[in-house]
Amino acid sequence: MKDNKKPRNDVLLAGQASEQGRNITVDSNAKHRARITRFGHLRQQSKEMSNWLFTQHDEARALDTPMGELMAKRFGHFANQLSGCANYLLFKHYYTLDKYKLSGLKTCKKHMLCPFCSAIRASKQATAYHDKMVHLLKENPKLKPVFVTLTVRNGDDLKERFYHLKDSFTTLQTARRKWLKRGNGHNEFCKAHGIVYAYEITNNGKGWHPHLHMILLVDDWIDKDKLSAEWYAITGDSFIVDVRRVKPSKAEVDTIDAKQQ
Ligand SMILES: [Zn+2]
């Protein structure tokens, strides 16, 4: 592979991964079986999403309008792509080690739509961030990783709730940056030296519930009650936050096997 070439995303090569020093795709027999089951479930979810897209395609076509035709074309395109995702998985068995290696897979790369690709992407990222975190913690032994969740009150308007969360988080981050620059307006977030975060949106029948999960590297334990009060002062309607200790020794992440929520 040439240096200026990006690695291919559609085929995850075990060789490539181990070249980067990540022993991510070697598994024992039992783990291999569990992994196949997990892949099977994800694949089933992708199939279901594909079927839903096909129904949208049919409904759009039934409108019998130019716009409907355009939408049908797009729905059909994505439905086909997801339907063929992960049809092909290649495992190699290393009998001297009794280990299985995922040697290649063909996926649709539509991670925003496809549960299988979303899972693969998430686990790749988890490994990459885990490696970075371990490195940073070695370099800075005073830092501690904590898992923080920020939530906003449920609501029926997803867009409104999502931006409420996003804007409130921006306010929290801006306050931290001001504190770093000018030294005033300290909040619990100022204890963070590094942060990785991801939005998650759920709906369990009681309205939309967007929330933020994040790992912070902190120099001092975050006071949950203080953070909750600060979060309420910003959001005006939400005070539920969660703070948990992360034990890096137990945070071993297997790229392919990282569990999906
Ligand atoms: Zn896919």
Image (cartoon, rainbow, N blue to C red):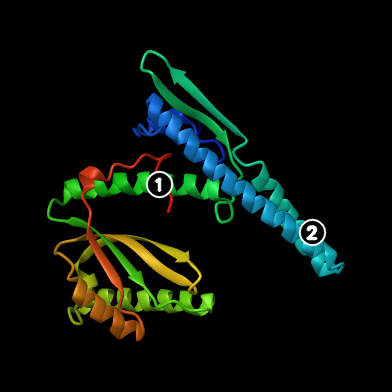
The three-letter amino acid code for the residue at tag 1 is Lys
Q: Residue at x 57, y 40 (%)?
A: 10
Residue 92 coordinates in the image, percent (x, y): 49, 22
Q: What residue type is labelled 2?
A: Asp
Residue 52 sits above or below residue 192 on the image: above
Local secondary structure at mark 2? helix
Residue 183 lies left or right of residue 10; in this view the side is left
**Height in image: 192 above or below 7?**
below
Percent across and percent down for residue 177 are 27, 74
What residue is at 59 percent from the left and 44 percent from the top? 44
From what the image shows, is residue 155 above or below residue 13? below
**The label number, if any, that marks residue 58 in the structure image:** 2
Mark 1 Cα-neighbour bin, 10 Å: few <14, some 14–19, many ≥20: few
User: Callout 2: few (<14), some (14-19), or many (20+) C-alpha neighbours within 10 Å?
Assistant: some
Q: How far apart are marks 1 and 2 (CA)?
A: 34 Å
Residue bearing the label numbered 1: 259
